[in-house]
Image (tube, helix red, strand yellow):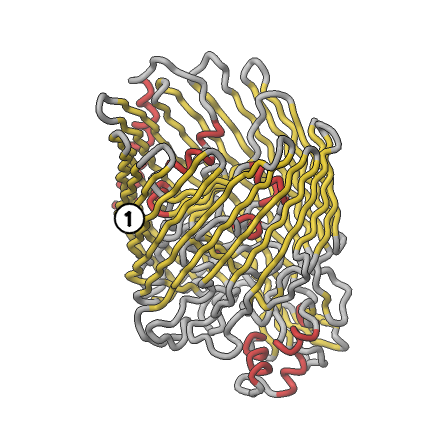
């Protein structure tokens, strides 16, 4: 009954907002879809928002032309990154001390639409859009993120794809580099006088990889094929605008969770053990978005968006050796103990022959969908003493994770894996469906009183979760059922006071919320978040300093194959109790004019974060935690320096990124800490003509090889020095 009522309420709200244009039919203007898919809009608007927001424009992305989202985001203050594969294929992103694991505590969007495979049912599931095809990006922190959900504690990242051009134009960016790496990004589109527009786009990325597998010639790289088609219809004389987007991506990556021991890392950081030679991830992603905008007047519009994401993945990867997890064997070798493994088992990991069927490889096979319908009303009201910019949104959403897995057994002979037996598909623990149904509503009103802007807001989330467990296939028997229903009211307020045309003070507070779980006894993640600071901007000069804090009523950990060293059930969550995060974000940027022909762009980004548990407890997931222990994978200090020299057709840019060592476990004992890392990238551009440019890029110029991660299963390196040469042709 209650579920039916909830759906009815959502549909009624959607219909009401859709019908509302009939009341306002005057002074209609053509819709601008690019504005509707954004949250911030542009760099100037980001700096004027009553809250923290960062906008990365297309010209900034083009400087280094990164394909790795983590390389892009390290220039944003307050963003925490946990490196893993060296390519950013499955990034671990946190904001302001939020847990980084599989980006499960932030809201990920593409063109304003949830893009995670199942943001409610499985928030840590990992599909990430191809960053190399993006036109711009927005990072929202603080009360600015209240319009997005469900994961609102850290913030939100909105990736904006290439817009349909207003006139016929296209581009081709092609590059080749080390490890047989090739990448091509091409797009072409146009908008006719009749209002019809289109865009065709592809992004192709391939590499053999930078690691070598013992006894095997298998690649350790990737092969990604990405295609996008957009169609729009927005006549100049119509109040209506319509856009259809279809995006498809297929990926094969020879990536592994298996790391190596510290001793082997010192000898060769880019080594992989032979037991990982069959590890392979295969994914397929489909996204469909239909968006309609109705201009009520020159001050009001309604945007309706329907979306559907489908994602399928199979990750065939090493699970156990003689029923012992590789991470435990590596821990034994590092510590010189035999707590979990004897010398013979340790030798198998390092390449010795195994007993029959000792090598277990699991096919982590899962299917996802995420779909919904949302309506947003934007309404500007101007009065004599104050103005209001009102935004109201409602969304009905469904998503699902379908898990159907098996474990095959192999025998290792002369560093070659030979199939011993195929496992049973859909056995206990490997055959389940998690479904979510949610209604979300929000209201935000930016009220301007002269130099003061006050933005109160509130978000409402109503979520139903259900988990169905079977022990065999076909799914004819009655499954085990776990369910949970949660409703949350999340208020926020942001303030900005413009002392002068150049100097502003800002402050904000909001109630953050994490997706619930069906795990018995686990509370939702909940935190009160506060920020206060100021920003100074004049022409190209920007100085911003913001202090932030998060007071967690309950920090939640989630069991994933990529993080856990315990024998928990993948997807289960665990209470971490009270925790606190305090920090400071600093940003400085400017363009110095050295002459009529020469400019010097400079940027400094620094983040300080103190994230710790506020209680003492023990458990199978977090281990033994003492009050004051650090929250894993949150660096205390991060620094990003970029500088350039632009002279006529020539351009030289450098990027220096420093990250502190971090604890991978709260206890931070031996072999539970990464190494501090400093990476220097350099790129040079030469504009041959108005249409043609060439560039040479070297990443990790000084060839720093650091232990940047210890999870999932052993020490893992950053990507080595890699040189790339490329060209860009515009037409």
- Residue 700 seen by the camera: yes
Instruction: Measuring from the top left, give residue 89's x and y in whole percent.
Output: 59, 53
**In the rendered image, which quarter is residue 677 located in?**
bottom right
Instruction: Measuring from the top left, give residue 31's x and y in whole percent.
Output: 45, 22
Where, quadrant-wise, is the C terminus in this rendering?
Answer: top right
Horizontal side, residue 344 vs residue 490: left or right: right
- The residue closer to the viewer here, 556 or 666, is 666
- Which residue is label 1 attached to? 509
Q: Say if 458 sits above or below 710 in the image.
A: above
Pointer 1: residues within 10 angstroms few (<14), some, or many (20+)?
many
**In the rendered image, which quarter is residue 299 located in?**
top left
Task: Look at 56% across and 74% down and name the residue there.
Answer: 327
**In the rendered image, which quarter is residue 626 located in?**
bottom left
Instruction: Measuring from the top left, give residue 161's x and y in whole percent.
Output: 55, 36
SS of the residue under disc 1:
strand
Instruction: Measuring from the top left, give residue 453's x and y in whole percent.
Output: 28, 35
Q: Say if 61 sits above or below 91 in the image.
A: above
Horizontal side, residue 400 vs residue 654: left or right: left
- The residue closer to the viewer here, 294 or 33, is 33
Where, quadrant-wise, is the N terminus in this rendering?
Answer: top left
- Residue 4 seen by the camera: no
Q: Residue furthest front?
A: 595
Task: Look at 42% across and 63% down and name the residue there.
Answer: 558
Count of all numbered marks drawn on residues in the image: 1
- The residue closer to the viewer here, 410 or 512, is 512
């Amino acid at each position: 009954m209650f579920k039916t009522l909830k759906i009815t309420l959502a549909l009624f709200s959607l219909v009401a907002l859709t019908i509302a244009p009939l009341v306002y039919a005057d002074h209609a203007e053509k819709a601008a879809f690019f504005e509707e898919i954004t949250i911030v809009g542009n760099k100037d608007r980001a700096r004027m928002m009553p809250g923290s927001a960062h906008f990365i424009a297309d010209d900034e992305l083009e400087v280094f032309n990164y394909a790795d989202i983590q390389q892009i985001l390290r220039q944003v203050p307050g963003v925490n990154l946990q490196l893993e594969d060296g390519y950013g294929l499955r990034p671990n992103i946190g904001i302001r001390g939020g847990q980084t694991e599989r980006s499960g505590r932030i809201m990920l969007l593409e063109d304003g639409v949830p893009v995670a495979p199942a943001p409610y049912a499985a928030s840590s599931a990992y599909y990430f859009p191809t960053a190399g095809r993006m036109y711009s990006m927005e990072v929202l922190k603080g009360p600015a993120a209240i319009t997005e959900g469900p994961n609102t504690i850290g913030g939100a990242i909105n990736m904006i794809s290439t817009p349909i051009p207003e006139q016929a134009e296209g581009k081709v960016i092609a590059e080749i580099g080390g490890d047989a790496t090739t990448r091509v990004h091409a797009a072409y589109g146009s908008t006719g006088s009749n209002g019809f527009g289109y865009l065709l786009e592809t992004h192709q990325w391939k590499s053999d990889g930078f690691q070598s597998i013992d006894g095997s010639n298998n690649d350790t790289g990737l092969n990604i094929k990405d295609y996008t088609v957009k169609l729009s219809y927005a006549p100049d004389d119509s109040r209506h605008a319509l856009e259809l987007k279809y995006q498809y991506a297929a990926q094969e990556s020879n990536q592994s969770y298996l790391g190596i021991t510290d001793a082997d890392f010192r000898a060769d950081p880019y080594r992989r053990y032979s037991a990982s030679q069959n590890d392979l991830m295969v994914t397929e992603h489909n996204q469909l978005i239909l968006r309609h905008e109705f201009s009520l007047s020159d001050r009001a519009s309604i945007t309706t968006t329907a979306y559907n994401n489908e994602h399928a993945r199979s990750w065939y990867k090493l699970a156990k050796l003689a029923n012992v997890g590789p991470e435990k064997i590596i821990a034994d070798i590092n510590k010189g103990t035999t707590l979990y493994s004897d010398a013979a088992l340790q030798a198998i990991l390092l390449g010795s022959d195994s007993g029959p069927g000792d090598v277990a490889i699991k096919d982590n096979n899962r299917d996802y969908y995420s779909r919904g319908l949302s309506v947003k009303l934007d309404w500007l009201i101007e009065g004599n003493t104050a103005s209001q910019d009102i935004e109201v949104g409602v969304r009905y959403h469904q998503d699902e994770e379908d898990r159907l897995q098996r474990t095959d057994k192999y025998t290792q002979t002369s560093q070659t894996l030979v199939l011993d037996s195929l496992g049973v598909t859909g056995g206990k623990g490997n055959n389940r469906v998690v479904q979510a149904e949610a209604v979300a509503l929000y209201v935000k009103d930016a009220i301007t009183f002269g130099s003061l802007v006050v933005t109160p807001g509130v978000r409402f989330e109503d979520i139903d979760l259900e988990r169905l467990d079977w022990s065999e296939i076909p799914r004819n028997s009655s499954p085990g059922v776990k369910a949970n229903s949660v409703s949350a009211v999340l208020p926020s307020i942001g303030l900005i006071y413009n002392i002068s045309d150049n100097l502003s003070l800002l402050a904000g507070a909001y109630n953050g919320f994490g997706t619930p779980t069906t795990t018995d006894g686990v509370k939702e993640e909940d935190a009160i978040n506060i920020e206060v600071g100021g920003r100074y901007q004049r022409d190209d000069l920007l100085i911003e300093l913001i202090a932030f804090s998060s007071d967690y009523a309950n920090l939640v950990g989630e069991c994933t194959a990529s993080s856990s060293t315990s024998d928990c059930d993948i997807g289960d969550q665990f209470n971490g109790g009270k925790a606190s995060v305090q920090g400071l974000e600093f940003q400085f940027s400017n363009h110095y004019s050295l002459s009529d022909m020469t400019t010097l762009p400079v940027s400094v980004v620094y983040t300080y974060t103190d994230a710790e548990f506020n209680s003492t407890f023990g458990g199978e997931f977090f281990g033994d935690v003492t009050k004051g222990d650090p929250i894993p994978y949150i660096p205390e200090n991060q620094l990003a320096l970029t500088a350039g020299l632009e002279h006529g057709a020539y351009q030289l840019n450098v990027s220096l990124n420093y990250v502190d060592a971090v604890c991978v476990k709260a206890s931070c004992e031996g072999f539970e800490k990464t190494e501090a890392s400093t990476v220097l990238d350099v790129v040079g551009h030469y504009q041959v003509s108005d249409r043609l440019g060439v560039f040479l890029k070297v990443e990790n110029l000084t060839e720093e090889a650091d232990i940047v991660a210890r999870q999932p299963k052993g020490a893992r390196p950053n990507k080595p020095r890699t040189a790339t040469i490329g060209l860009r042709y515009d037409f």
